Image (spheres, rainbow, N blue to C red):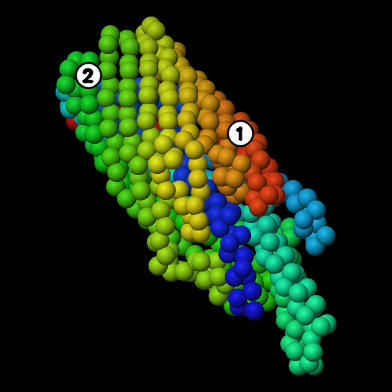
């Protein structure tokens, strides 16, 4: 039975987002973003090394070092509506979810500023960001196996009919054997498709870092340029006790893949008057070419998974715009806009393509210095994703959202800043159609973070 799922490869291509959700440019790169999502005019803190690289030229002299970690509490869900197509064969409507908490989501930034010159760098999770475990599978994997089972049911019925009209006993026996084999395969595949018939585990993390320089050409105009290094890793396992019966050699199909690239980031910061900031930043496309390795499972080849295979999963180019106003000494307000050029990126997975439209997000926020040892921040953000009815992901839903970020900065001693912040997201459920079957995707995420920043003014 080694090849019994070969015909399901086409079905799997139609749900390729199962293994990769398309590219997401992460913007929650540090505690500052969680505190206030409007960051595109940042020019006082080392987090400018990601959000507004040209703003580093306006910082005070010295070395700034920042490090932090986020704690991500999430629930991803998908509710499958099979209608009547598979109900008679045992695949009914069901809901599956993942509640894996991410305890390690680190970041680091530094800026060295001397007169009109600045050197900046950062490290963080640029895409992906953790592990997902669906103990009862997902709508996409269930439909994959159910469609394959339907195909074998059709083959079994055809072979049985042929046996009834066979003119020789030998032919009749052969048709009956073929019908039994196809029926057995269909039964195993449908049991795999049912809720609890298989599990899916995915880890996808894209680490990134950038290093660059900024220069203050005029008292009110700066320019910055840098290089960005991105390294992506993927690790997928799908497990079912029926795989062994289907000739897989074990109960698991799995693979690992990784890829890397180097791209550029450029920025301009302009202050038409002392209390107003205008910033533009462009992050070029990071074209990440993945190479597959460590493939396990005899059936993996039937899904077009094999060692040495390559595919691209790019981080799209992004345009970041910002405007800020120092209303009076304690209060700074700002607006930020990010636009992602998804249509110019190859957002492929190991088994096919995911086609997203361009997406954008807009944020408003305020930072208020209450006293010499405490500041408070609050910000709001709305994000519009470039999804369509047939371009999304069952295991990592890409959904429109509204976020509220808030937090405080403490200054316990001179030059030291301690940041505590949280981002609370409201995601809007959406319908995603797989081979005509409706899946309702949902998502709940809360991010909490702690960070430390130290300024060495005499370096």
Which residue is at a point 79% across and 86% down the rendered structure image? 166
- Asked if labels 1 and 2 touch by Cβ distance under 8 angstroms, the answer is no
Nearer to me, 359 or 124:
359
Position of residue 116 in the picture relative to residue 188 (left or right): left
Which numbered circle lies on residue 427?
1
Considering only vertical position in the picture, is 182 above or below 92?
below
Considering only vertical position in the picture, is 255 above or below 362?
below
- Residue 48 sits in which quadrant? top left
- Residue 343 sits in which quadrant? top left
Nearer to me, 379 or 448:
379
Nearer to me, 289 or 409:
289
Choose the circle earlier in sequence order: 2 or 1.
2
Considering only vertical position in the picture, is 298 above or below 333?
below
Q: Position of residue 270 (x, y in %)?
A: 27, 18
Considering only vertical position in the picture, is 259 above or below 69?
below
Local packing at callout 2 (Cα closer than 10 Å; few below 14, some 14-19, many 20+) is some
Which numbered circle lies on residue 439?
none
How many numbered badges does the structure rendering display? 2
Which numbered circle lies on residue 221?
2
Q: Position of residue 322 (x, y in %)?
A: 38, 21
Which residue is at a point 66% across and 40% down the rendered structure image? 431
The quadrant of the rendering that contains the C terminus is top left
């Amino acid at each position: 039975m080694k090849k019994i799922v070969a015909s399901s490869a086409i079905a799997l291509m139609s749900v390729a987002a199962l293994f990769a959700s398309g590219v997401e440019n992460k913007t929650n790169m540090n505690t500052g973003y969680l505190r206030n999502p409007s960051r595109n005019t940042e020019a006082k803190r080392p987090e400018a090394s990601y959000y507004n690289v040209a703003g580093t030229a306006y910082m005070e002299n010295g070395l700034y070092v920042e490090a932090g970690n986020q704690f991500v509490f999430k629930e991803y869900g998908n509710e499958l509506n099979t209608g009547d197509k598979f109900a008679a064969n045992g695949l009914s409507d069901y809901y599956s979810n993942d509640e894996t908490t991410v305890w390690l989501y680190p970041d680091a930034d530094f800026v060295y500023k001397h007169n009109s010159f600045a050197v900046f760098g950062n490290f963080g999770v640029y895409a992906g960001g953790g592990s997902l475990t669906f103990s009862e599978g997902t709508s996409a994997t269930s439909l994959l196996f159910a469609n394959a089972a339907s195909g074998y049911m059709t083959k079994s019925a055809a072979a049985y009919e042929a046996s009834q009209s066979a003119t020789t006993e030998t032919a009749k026996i052969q048709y009956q054997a073929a019908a039994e084999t196809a029926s057995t395969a269909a039964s195993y595949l449908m049991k795999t498709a049912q809720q609890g018939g298989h599990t899916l585990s995915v880890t996808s993390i894209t680490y990134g870092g950038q290093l660059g320089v900024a220069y203050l050409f005029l008292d009110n105009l700066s320019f910055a340029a840098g290089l960005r290094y991105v390294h992506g890793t993927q690790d997928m396992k799908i497990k079912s006790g029926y795989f062994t019966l289907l000739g897989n050699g074990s109960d698991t199909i799995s693979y690992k893949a990784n890829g890397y690239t180097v791209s550029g980031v450029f920025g301009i910061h302009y202050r038409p008057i002392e209390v107003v900031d205008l910033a533009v930043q462009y992050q070029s496309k990071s074209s990440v070419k993945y190479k597959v390795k460590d493939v396990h499972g005899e059936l993996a080849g039937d899904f077009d998974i094999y060692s040495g295979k390559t595919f691209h999963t790019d981080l799209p180019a992004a345009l970041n715009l910002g405007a800020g106003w120092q209303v009076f000494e304690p209060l700074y307000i700002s607006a930020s806009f990010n636009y992602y050029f998804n249509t110019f990126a190859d957002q492929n997975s190991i088994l096919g393509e995911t086609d997203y439209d361009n997406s954008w997000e807009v944020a408003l926020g305020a930072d208020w210095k209450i006293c010499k040892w405490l500041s408070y921040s609050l910000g709001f953000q709305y994000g519009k994703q470039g999804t369509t009815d047939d371009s999304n992901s069952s295991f990592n839903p890409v959904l429109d959202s509204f976020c509220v970020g808030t937090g405080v900065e403490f200054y316990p001693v001179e030059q030291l800043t301690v940041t505590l912040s949280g981002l609370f997201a409201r995601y809007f459920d959406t319908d995603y159609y797989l081979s005509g079957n409706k899946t309702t995707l949902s998502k709940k995420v809360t991010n909490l973070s702690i960070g430390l920043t130290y300024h060495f003014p005499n370096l």
